[in-house]
C-alpha cells in the first residue's frame, strides 16, 4: 500500500525550489529514480508521498526527463534523493514535521503464544512507541515511516 498525504504534499506550497531556489510554482515532486519500484511506486503509480522534493515546474520536468536517460539514471537517482533529503531537512527545521519523544512500551515479540492469545486485535503485529505512532513488526521499509508521518500530518496511511 502506497502512503498518501495531501497535507504533506501541500507543505511544498510557498517553499523555494531545493534545486534552483525559485519560489513560483513549487510542488512536491515524487521520486522517479531507479529504486522507485522498491519504494511504493509502480507502472503508473507514484512512490510514497514522503518521497518528494520541493521542486519548481522547470526542475520537476528536468528530473522527470533525466530519469528516462539510461546512461544517467544512477546519478539522477542520487541527485533526487539529495533533493528529498533537503526537503525533509526543511520540514524539520521549519517545524512542519515534528518528532515527539516519550516513554517506549514493550510488546512481546510477534508470534509468541502469550502475545497472540492475550492481545486485542492489532496488538500482535505492532507496538506503541509514542502517542499516535505505531511501528509494525512486519519490517516493510515504508510502513513504519508512513505511520509516523500520518501521526504528524493527521492523515491515515
Image (cartoon, rainbow, N blue to C red):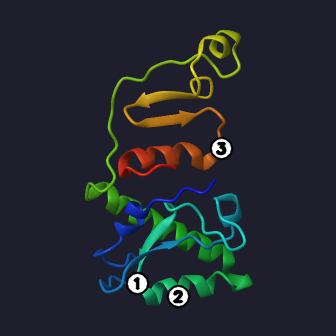
Q: Is residue 35 visible?
A: no
| Secondary structure of the residue carrying numbered label 2 | helix
Q: Position of residue 12 (x, y in %)?
A: 36, 71
Relative height, residue 28 to residue 92 (above, below): below
Extreme-bottom residue of the structure? 58
How much space separates mark 2 and mark 3, taking CA atoms?
31 Å
Q: Nearer the viewer, residue 23 or 69?
A: 23
Q: Is 126 on the left-hand or right-hand side of 86?
A: right
Question: In the rendered image, which residue does mark 2 sit on?
Answer: 61
Q: Position of residue 37 (x, y in %)?
A: 70, 64
Relative height, residue 51 to residue 120 (above, below): below
Q: Residue 147 — which label?
A: none
**Disc nearer the start of the sequence (2/3):** 2
Badge 3: residue crowd in 10 Å (few <14, some 14–19, many ≥20):
few
Q: Pointers 2 and 3 in contact (CB under 8 A)?
A: no
How much space separates mark 3 and mark 1, taking CA atoms?
31 Å
Question: In the rendered image, which residue does mark 1 sit on?
Answer: 56
**Disc nearer the start of the sequence (3/1):** 1
Question: In the rendered image, which residue does mark 3 sit on?
Answer: 140
Q: Nearer the viewer, residue 124 or 137?
A: 124
Residue at position x 50%, y 62% from top? 49
Badge 1: residue crowd in 10 Å (few <14, some 14–19, many ≥20):
many
How much space separates mark 1 and mark 2, taking CA atoms?
9 Å
Badge 2: residue crowd in 10 Å (few <14, some 14–19, many ≥20):
few
Amino acid at each position: 500500500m502506497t502512503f498518501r498525504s495531501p497535507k504533506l504534499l501541500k507543505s511544498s506550497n510557498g517553499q523555494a525550489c531545493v534545486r534552483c531556489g525559485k519560489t513560483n510554482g513549487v510542488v512536491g515532486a515524487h521520486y522517479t529514480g531507479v529504486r522507485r519500484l522498491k519504494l511504493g511506486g509502480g507502472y503508473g503509480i507514484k512512490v510514497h508521498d514522503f518521497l518528494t522534493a520541493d521542486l519548481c515546474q522547470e526542475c520537476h520536468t528536468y528530473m522527470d526527463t533525466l530519469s528516462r536517460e539510461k546512461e544517467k539514471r544512477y546519478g539522477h537517482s542520487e541527485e533526487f534523493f539529495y533533493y528529498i533529503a533537503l526537503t525533509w531537512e526543511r520540514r524539520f527545521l521549519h517545524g512542519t514535521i515534528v518528532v515527539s519523544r516519550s516513554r517506549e512500551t514493550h510488546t512481546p515479540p510477534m508470534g509468541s503464544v502469550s502475545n497472540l492469545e492475550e492481545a486485542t486485535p492489532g496488538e500482535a503485529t505492532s507496538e506503541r512507541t509514542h502517542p499516535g505512532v505505531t511501528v509494525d513488526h512486519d519490517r516493510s521499509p515504508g510502513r513504519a515511516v508512513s505511520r509516523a508521518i500520518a501521526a504528524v500530518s493527521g492523515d491515515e496511511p
